[in-house]
Image: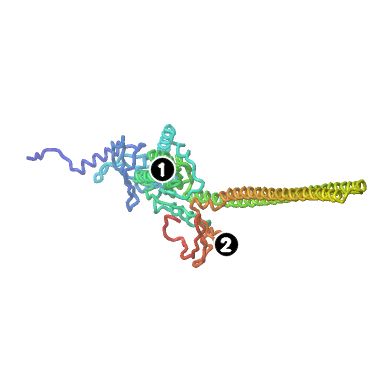
Amino acid sequence: MFNTQTQYQTLSQFLTEIKEFFQDWAEYRWIVAEIARVDSDKNGHYWFELVEKSNGDIIAQTGAVLWKGNVDTIHNFYLKTGINIQRGLKILFLGKAIFHEKYGFKINIFQIDPSYTLGEMEIRKKEVLERLEKEGLLEKNKAFEIPIIIQKIAIISSESAAGYEDFLKILKDNKYGFKFYIRLYDSFVQGQEAVTSILNALNQCALEYEKYDVIVIIRGGGSVVDLQCFDEYEIAKKIANMPLPVLTGIGHTRDKTVADHVAHSSFKTPSEVAKFILEKALNFDSQIESLKKLITNKAKFIINMEISKNNNYAKTIRISVNGLLNKLKSRMNSLLTDTGKVVFTRFNTEKEKLFRIKNLFHKNTNQRLKNEVIKINSINNRTILKVSQFLTKSKFNLTRNHQAITEKTKNLMHIKTIELRQIEDKLRLLSPENILKRGYSITYFNGKALKNAGNVNIGDNIEIYLFKGKIWGKVRKKEEGNGKLNLF
């Protein structure tokens, strides 16, 4: 049975007493805590849920309020850090314990120190960088050599990010007509799920790395807190160990994230990454054009040199043959002259002998005279026969020498023709057609190489040169820049 003499208080009286105790005892103090939740009401007051963690576990938790009259401290915090007050942020604030009969215990936040939050983030970032350097990961991805031309690109970004749209627009609308294969690995790039999402995308890229030339991580700017996921050790470690060069264009100008430090190359914005890729393609195209001109000029020079050499060879051979023929002709004439002299000298000698015999043996019989005549005729016939045989042999030798010279000339011309063909084969190996073996093609319009889709109209006839064959076609459709393409 209740004793009416017992002293008691109502709940409001008891809580009011506690409230008065807090008012007498509480003082403003600097406190460190992590924001677990923050909301604002229609009156402009901010309501917080603050926690302290140890090894990931919450060891202290309480509510807090920042009244409308002190809201300038939030604006000042943003102006000095570029960070909105949000969940996951660790802050140093000037606060005082308060108690209300209806709403219970809370901390009244009077002022927030922006330098502490920035300092905590920088300390953590520095620790991550030091760990990566100690493990030899800071320069690991930089050891890869970026291809001369980047055509196959894996993108890690949010599909809705403005930076991703800027990146696509620069590559897709390039005035040079370059085509790129791009695949997006859609992921969160801020918030609590960002780290897991980006790691999953990187793992998928690593499994399919043979399909790509580079991996590009882009975002589109944001506050320091928005970019915190790119300072995480696990993401940085994964980037460093990727089997391809990693390019970053996270979109910030104040400072580099840890991801920028471990990537092969970092750029301030996604647009700068796209311009870098486009510039490499343009440089490669210029090198191809220069090489084409160099090969053409070199080929013309070599062909002209060989033609000149062959002309000189032919001229030298003609002069040699004519000289040899003239020598043979002169020798033949000399032989004929000498032979004629011998014949006529012998003939005269025999004739004189005949006359001597005739005078000496005038008294001989007619038979002796006939015998002498026969003897002279025989000698004359033998002489003529020898002259004829000599002339026949000389003519045969002349014909044989002429044939030998002609055959040698043909062989020499044949050898030089083979050498010229070998040189032509070498030039053919250096010709632009061999470049087409790599899978490139050349499109001509009105006799000129086509580099820009804007130079043709629907219905125009075009010629496409492949490594094997040639295709005639008609333009049926042009890409107008709307819609999403993986290959453009």
Q: Position of residue 8 (x, y in %)?
A: 15, 39
Image quadrant holding the C terminus, namely bottom left
Dot 2 surroundings within 10 Å: few (below 14), some, or many (20 or more)?
few
- What x and y, as percent, mark residue 353? 89, 46
The residue lying toward the viewer, choosing from 475 and 87, is 475
Question: Amino acid type of disc 2?
Answer: Gly
Q: Secondary structure at mark 1?
A: helix
Q: Is residue 174 visible?
A: no
Residue under circle 1? 230
Name the side, left or right, on which 216 lies relative to 301. Answer: left
Residue 179 in view here: yes
Check disc 2 and report its element: helix, strand or loop.
loop
Residue 22 in the image: x percent, y percent? 28, 38
Describe residue 26's horizontal placement relative to residue 406 as left or right: left
The tag on residue 447 is 2
The percent coordinates of residue 137 (x first, y second) are 43, 36
> In screen coordinates, is 458 left or right of 423?
left
The quarter in which the N terminus is drawn is: top left
Looking at the picture, tell me which residue is in the foreground, 48 or 318.
318
Q: Find the distance from the CA under tag 2 to the CA under tag 1.
A: 51 Å
- Numbered marks: total: 2
